Image: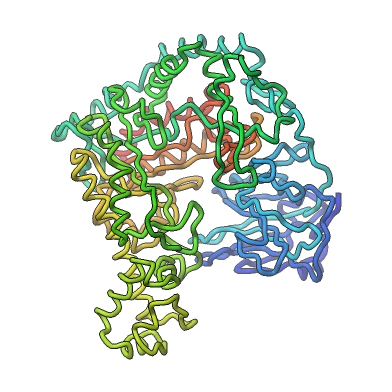
């Protein structure tokens, strides 16, 4: 171990840089000696952080992790991030590695942030534990960093509306990395540890099914749920035969086909699980089926969306475990078990990314999932994680949208159990920073050539219609363009954004979003007129895009990963007065053999379950929100899904199809009281 900062002396404060933070030494929360560093993160600032800069680059070769002790003295969870930079140009994406965790109220924890190995080099987001009693921070941006040239590291927070405090102590470097050889057992579990519920044998796996069936027979469904999972004893509204929305008092609700009030609790990815790469990583697995083994059918081949493992042979441990548990006809047996589970646990929706076999199941409502793919023009926004944004002004976009929606609409059209359509997911609506975050698509369109970009041409037409003469645009923007034709190639903008330019950017982003949502809406109204348009599941968004969505979608949708729904953070929705549904949220922990917590961390399964209850109740208490869907039904593979290496503890069931009892208990408790709570919270 190499101690970097102990905070025992005032002089150590000189090494710290306070960016939108206040620093002082304190005895409270000290774990190494008598003092620690108290960091107050200031409100209403982007990325407040405690940063340590190297006077000359540090050489951290030979060290496996950056460790520190942290105390949260507040009465609420704090989500924080850690970033290590190997170049002054680091921006959160390039030249750095970054991870996140959520520390619970009044909690002390010892953390380690991985340095030596890049998990993505091994096809994973998280790796096995580093040291006893240390909580590993899951990597989000898993970039390779030059350990011989570390220039800075920081502990940062996201923008908040009030001050938040953390106490940091004992910052140090740790040696050693655990071998990855033989880390996976025959069931896809971590082989080097034991925990409650770990499957020990094939007979144990099969016995869990029998035990669970008794529980499902004893607790078939919440007493106040009707056949749709709607409020059986609640108000009776007009029955239209399909799902719709209605405002009752000051609360928005979904309304079931029978006219009963409905709040949607659901699971994403109710399917046969994700495959993990085998090619190049055979040494990690203690067992794999030989060719000719019945379980060899669960081998496959995949191409990755990101990471160094581009393509190769895969194996699906979850599907293999289903076959071992339920027998040769496992698909039908598992689907029946899953329907019974969802009813028993109080879930009334099969949500996004789930099997097509759930369509028209006649027992649990479901959403229809569609997307837009194909060759049409795209526009960068500055934050293009899953890819650049569709150009809705390209006529080919509408053609491709129809091609994506039509086969789904043909399957679910006129089925009363279909809640509605999500179309697309986490699109690149916004860029980085305060200005680019709202106007990223405007910047992106101007960076293109009008000869190749329908969006750029639409933007120029909008500007020309407003200003007429180029001189008027120059005056408004503080620019000096010689002609309108000078704007056709990629545009260089004056560094200072005038108010007029911001207004023009805002108008373009709103027009862009209207074109997108109107195109999708028209196709849905034609092909599936009885079903709700549930939006595009915003992750990155601008206010202008949300306003346009509110005009054209029946329900707005956001993927919100946080300890709970912060009502203040979503106050911008109040004037829009539209129903809203959360498409994704989750929490994960590392106490049952998994390597990564996912996007919001809990210290253990008990706290994970408590967070579930808190989150759902915070959604129930908001008058605009009409549901929330957990991502996802089962844990991801221990060694990472082939798509992108995610290996998160985010399931209600394990890779062996065993329910987490704490999560099930929290769901039953929360869902059985949810309708009464929502009505009383007015």
Which quadrant would residue 61 be assigned to in this image? bottom right
Give the vertical position of 501 relative to 674 (above or below): below
Q: Does 221 sit above or below residue 583?
A: above
Residue 449 in the image: state x and y as whole percent. 41, 72
Q: Quadrant of the C terminus?
A: top left
User: Taking 551 as reference, is 267 left or right?
Assistant: right
| Residue drawn 35% across the image and 31% down it | 349
Give the image location of residue 450, x and y in percent.
Answer: 37, 72
Seen at 72% across and 45% down, the residue is: 110
Residue 108: in sight, yes or no?
no
Q: Is residue 5 left or right of residue 373?
A: right
| Residue appearing at x 78%, y 37% in the figure | 132
Above or below, 20 relative to 5: below
| Observer-nearest of 345 and 271 | 271
> Can see residue 491?
yes
Residue displayed at 44% across by 42% down: 584
**In this rendering, is residue 635 above or below 28?**
above
Q: How many marks?
A: 0
Determine which quarter of the picture holds residue 297: top right
- What coloring was used for the rendering? rainbow
Residue 236 position, x and y percent, is 17, 31
Give how far across and how far down residue 623 sits, in percent: 30, 47
Work out whether residue 328 or residue 335 is closer to the camera in this orientation and state it: 328
């Amino acid at each position: 171990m190499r101690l970097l900062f102990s905070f025992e002396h005032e002089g150590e404060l000189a090494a710290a840089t306070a960016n939108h933070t206040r620093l002082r030494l304190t005895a409270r929360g000290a774990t190494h000696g008598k003092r620690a560093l108290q960091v107050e993160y200031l409100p209403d600032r982007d990325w407040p952080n405690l940063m340590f800069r190297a006077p000359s680059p540090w050489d951290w070769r030979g060290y496996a992790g950056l460790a520190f002790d942290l105390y949260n003295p507040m009465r609420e969870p704090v989500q924080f991030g850690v970033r290590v930079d190997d170049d002054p140009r680091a921006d959160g994406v390039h030249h750095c590695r970054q991870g996140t965790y959520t520390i619970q109220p009044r909690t002390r924890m010892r953390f380690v942030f991985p340095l030596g190995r890049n998990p993505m080099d091994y096809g994973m987001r998280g790796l096995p534990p580093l040291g006893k009693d240390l909580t590993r921070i899951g990597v989000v941006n898993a970039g390779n960093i030059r350990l011989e040239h570390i220039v800075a590291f920081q502990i940062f927070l996201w923008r908040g509306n009030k001050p938040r405090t953390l106490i940091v102590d004992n910052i140090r470097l740790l040696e050693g990395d655990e071998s990855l050889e033989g880390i996976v057992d025959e069931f896809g579990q971590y082989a080097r540890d034991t925990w409650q519920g770990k499957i020990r044998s094939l007979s144990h796996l099969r016995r869990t099914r029998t035990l669970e069936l008794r529980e499902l027979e004893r607790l078939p469904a919440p007493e106040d749920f009707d056949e749709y999972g709607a409020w059986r004893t609640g108000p009776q509204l007009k029955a239209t035969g399909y799902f719709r929305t209605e405002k009752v008092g000051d609360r928005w609700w979904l309304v079931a086909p029978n006219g009963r009030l409905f709040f949607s609790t659901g699971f994403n990815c109710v399917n046969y699980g994700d495959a993990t790469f085998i090619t190049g990583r055979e040494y990690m697995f203690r067992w794999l089926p030989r060719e000719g083994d019945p379980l060899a059918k669960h081998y496959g081949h995949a191409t990755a969306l990101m990471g160094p493992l581009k393509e190769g042979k895969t194996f699906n441990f979850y599907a293999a475990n289903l076959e071992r548990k339920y027998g040769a006809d496992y698909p039908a047996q598992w689907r029946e078990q899953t329907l019974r589970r969802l009813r028993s646990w109080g879930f009334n929706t099969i949500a996004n990314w789930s099997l097509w076999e759930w369509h028209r199941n006649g027992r649990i409502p479901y959403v229809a999932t569609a997307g837009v793919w194909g060759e049409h023009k795209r526009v960068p926004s500055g934050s293009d994680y899953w890819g650049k944004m569709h150009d809705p002004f390209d006529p080919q976009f509408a053609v491709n949208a129809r091609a994506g929606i039509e086969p789904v609409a043909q399957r679910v059209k006129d089925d009363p159990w279909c809640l509605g359509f999500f179309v697309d997911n986490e699109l690149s609506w916004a860029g980085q920073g305060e200005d680019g975050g709202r106007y990223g698509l405007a910047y992106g369109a101007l960076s293109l050539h009008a000869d190749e970009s329908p969006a750029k041409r639409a933007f120029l037409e909008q500007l020309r219609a407003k200003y007429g003469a180029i001189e008027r645009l120059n005056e408004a923007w503080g620019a000096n363009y010689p002609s309108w034709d000078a704007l056709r190639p990629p545009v260089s903008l004056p560094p200072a954004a005038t108010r007029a330019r911001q207004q023009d950017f805002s108008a373009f982003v709103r027009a862009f979003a209207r074109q997108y949502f109107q195109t999708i809406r028209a196709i849905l109204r034609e092909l599936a007129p009885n079903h709700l348009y549930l939006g595009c599941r915003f992750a990155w968004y601008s206010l202008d895009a949300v306003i346009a969505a509110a005009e054209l979608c029946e329900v707005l949708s956001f993927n919100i990963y946080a300890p709970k729904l912060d009502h203040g953070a979503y106050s911008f929705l109040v004037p829009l007065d539209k129903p809203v549904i959360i498409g994704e949220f989750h929490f994960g922990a590392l106490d049952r053999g998994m390597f990564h917590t996912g996007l919001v961390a809990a210290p253990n399964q008990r706290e994970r379950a408590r967070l579930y209850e808190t989150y759902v109740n915070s959604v129930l208490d908001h008058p605009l929100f009409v549901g929330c869907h957990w991502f996802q039904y089962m844990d991801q593979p221990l060694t990472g899904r082939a798509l992108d290496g995610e290996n998160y503890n985010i399931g209600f069931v394990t890779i062996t199809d065993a329910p987490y009892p704490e999560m099930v208990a929290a769901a039953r408790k929360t869902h059985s009281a949810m309708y009464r709570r929502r009505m009383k919270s007015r």
